[in-house]
Image (cartoon, helix red, strand yellow):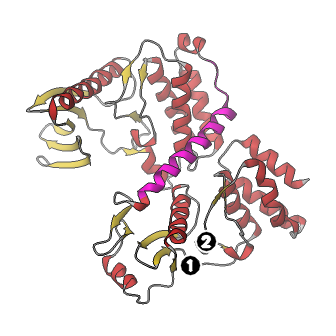
Amino acid sequence: MTGGSLVLKQSLHRCVRLERRSEGPVIVKRFEQRGPLGRALDAGRARREYEVLTHLAKASVSVPRALSLTRRGRAYEVEIEWIDGARSLAELCRAGAPLSVELARRLGELLAGLHSAGVDHPDLHAGNVLITEACRVVAVDFDKARIVKRVGDEQVSRDLVSLCAGLREATLPRWRAVALRAWWKALDLGLRDRLAPPRAFEVEQLARARRLRVVQDRERRWTRAGSAVMALASGRGFARAGADPALIARALAGETLPSSTIRVSGSRRQVLALWRSMARLEEHAVPAPRCWLLSDESPACAWFERELPRKPSSPRGRGRWIGALIDRALWCPGLAEEDLDDSGLRLPRVLARLSMSEARERLAPWLAGLSPDARREFLRGLAESWRGPLRECRELVLQLHA
């Protein structure tokens, strides 16, 4: 099929579109701001994208080919090779797709190629890494990147921590350790001699802290129109993006909804706290009721969706859910056994921050009444859901066994 254009990304000053041409599809990135200063910035960003991609291609780093750099009126456009059949690593993680050990190795080798080629990519994350069906790993989006004379420890630490933070809830620490070893092994020898060898435990600790900050920032997506929620047509509030308008109207009219829907009303402060807490659990990939509809009228109301319980949670299931919560440095004050079932958290709850030093104290009541076999199952479930440093998990389990 030839002809036609499809917008892939659009922001105030940048547009990314896929153009179908007779010679094949092409990605076109268009930079367009108003005013002379904005146009100068556009020219610099477009030129950097083109020059960095050309530089990396010459260094045999896996990136799409830069095809052309042109000025069109007041805008600057960069044409880039289209990678057929590729999906972003972030998309694969959200879909729960299994990530192979080979993919971990190739991701590490890609990062080593960027560092060895002397490229600083400050916007490197799982959304800017593409994976093809043949397991080719490709880095994209270089308009903020630059070629540097010397890659230092600070930049390396930033990149390793950023990638680990974005992948920590979709991969196990062992998977990320494979990527880290592959990165170190593939580095240019001269660069490796200058860098301090990274310690996996420290990288994982920093990745957890970064992920907590990122998720906290992403909570804002759930109280403003965007990719997560859309503004209600009438009144104040938000509905989950893609929600059925007919169901929204029924909810706001007070009509009966499916049994999987939970309605909570109260003060604006209470309802917003619940809404944000459940949004945080969803961002952290912890099973809980999903934000569906928020009405900011008086009294404030929120509706959440949840899986219907299949059966009461087992000790292993409870351990798995609580382990995921603690791994994200979170807790639900007053959490009890009946709050959980086989599909996760039964009702929306307000979250609190939890330091790792407090984890043992919080877990003691959950283990006190369990038989030795049930305790082992609980701790096994906790270990299964852990996404932080393995050493940290082993220490916690040993303390709880004592």
Disc nearer the start of the sequence (1/2): 1
Amino acid beneath label 1? Leu
Residue 100 seen in this snapshot: no
Residue at (42%, 50%) from the top-left corner?
91
For this view, does 109 lie left or right of residue 286?
Answer: left
Q: Which mark is residue 308?
A: 1
Kind of residue at disc 2: Ser
Please, what secondary structure does the residue beneath circle 2 have? loop
In this view of the protein, which residue sits in the foreground, 132 or 31? Answer: 31
Residue range highlighted in magenta: 196-221
Q: Is residue 393 magenta?
A: no
- Look at the numbered discs 1 and 2 and tell me whether their residues touch, using CB distance below 8 Å: yes
Up the image or down, 186 lies above or below 250; here it is above
Label 1 crowd (10 A; few <14 / some 14-19 / many >=20): some
Residue farthest along the left direction in this orientation:
73
Above or below, 11 relative to 269: above
Residue at the (54%, 33%) spot, across then down = 105
Residue at 57 percent across and 67 percent down: it is 288
Crowding at label 2, few (<14), some or many (≥20) Cα neighbours within 10 Å? some
How much space separates mark 1 and mark 2, taking CA atoms? 7 Å
Q: Quadrant of residue 372?
A: bottom right
Q: Is residue 66 above or below residue 267?
A: above
Residue at label 2? 343
Q: Is residue 372 left or right of residue 82?
A: right
Residue 402, given in percent of the width and then of the height, sits at 91, 53
**Secondary-structure class at tag 1:** loop
Task: Check residue 199 for magenta coloring.
Answer: yes
Please tell me whether the stretch drawn in magenta is mainly helix, strand or loop.
helix
